[in-house]
Image (cartoon, rainbow, N blue to C red):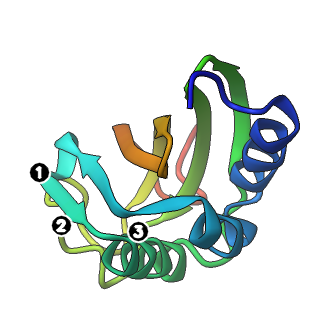
């Protein structure tokens, strides 16, 4: 694959705008040997089934949170999707050691998706976690 089809790229970016719809589309886009990386949480997940399971786990932890898309673009074989979401950290996202369960946080996320002939082969997730004051605190 030399370039990503523009219509398909737009469908993928639309699905990333609403992460609940992403796994269904990603299942057909991911290569069997896709690699999902999140350096901030020191995570590497390999293989379509494992990556889809990881997505489902993260989505369950973020249930009800509404991400805001900040930037989306594609060029050649790469998609870029940047978003931000504020939420209360639930139990179960234990691989994010810097934010305890119950804390309010803003997650800024940049996803870089790389495609090859086999499909989506690499998903790099760059995260920045910002603690927020509790609801009702002065200035919140």
Q: CA distance from mark 3 to mark 1?
A: 18 Å
The residue that disc 2 covers is 95
- Side of 21 where 63 appears, left or right: left
Splitting the image into 4 quarters, where does residue 103 fall?
bottom left
Vertically, is 22 above or below 12?
below
| Residue 140 in sight in this render | no
Q: Looking at the image, is mark 3 or mark 1 earlier in the sequence?
A: 1
Q: Which residue is mark 1?
A: 42
Q: Quadrant of the C terminus?
A: top right
Q: Residue at x 29, y 70 (%)?
A: 47
Sequence-wise first label, 3 or 2: 3
Q: Are marks 1 and 2 in contact (CB under 8 Å)?
A: yes
Pair 3/1: label in front = 1
Quadrant in the picture for the N terminus: top right
Residue 85 x %, y % = 60, 48
Q: Nearer the viewer, residue 74 or 127?
A: 74
Give how far across and how far down residue 95 sits, in percent.
Answer: 18, 67
- At a point 55% along the width and 26% down the height, the residue shown is 77
- Per the image, the residue denoted by label 3 is 89
Q: Residue at x 58, y 51 (%)?
A: 86
């Amino acid at each position: 694959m030399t370039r990503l089809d523009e219509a398909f790229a737009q469908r993928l970016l639309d699905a990333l705008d609403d992460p609940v719809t992403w796994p269904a589309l990603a299942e057909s886009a991911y290569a069997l040997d896709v690699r999902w990386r999140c350096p901030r949480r020191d995570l590497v997940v390999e293989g379509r089934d494992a990556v889809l399971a990881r997505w489902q786990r993260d989505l369950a932890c973020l249930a009800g949170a509404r991400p805001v898309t900040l930037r989306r673009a594609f060029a050649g074989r790469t998609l870029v999707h940047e978003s931000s979401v504020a939420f209360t950290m639930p139990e179960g996202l234990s691989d994010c050691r810097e934010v305890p369960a119950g804390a309010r946080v803003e997650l800024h996320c940049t996803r870089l998706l790389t495609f090859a002939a086999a499909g989506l082969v690499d998903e790099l997730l760059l995260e920045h976690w910002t603690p927020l004051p509790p609801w009702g605190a002065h200035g919140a």
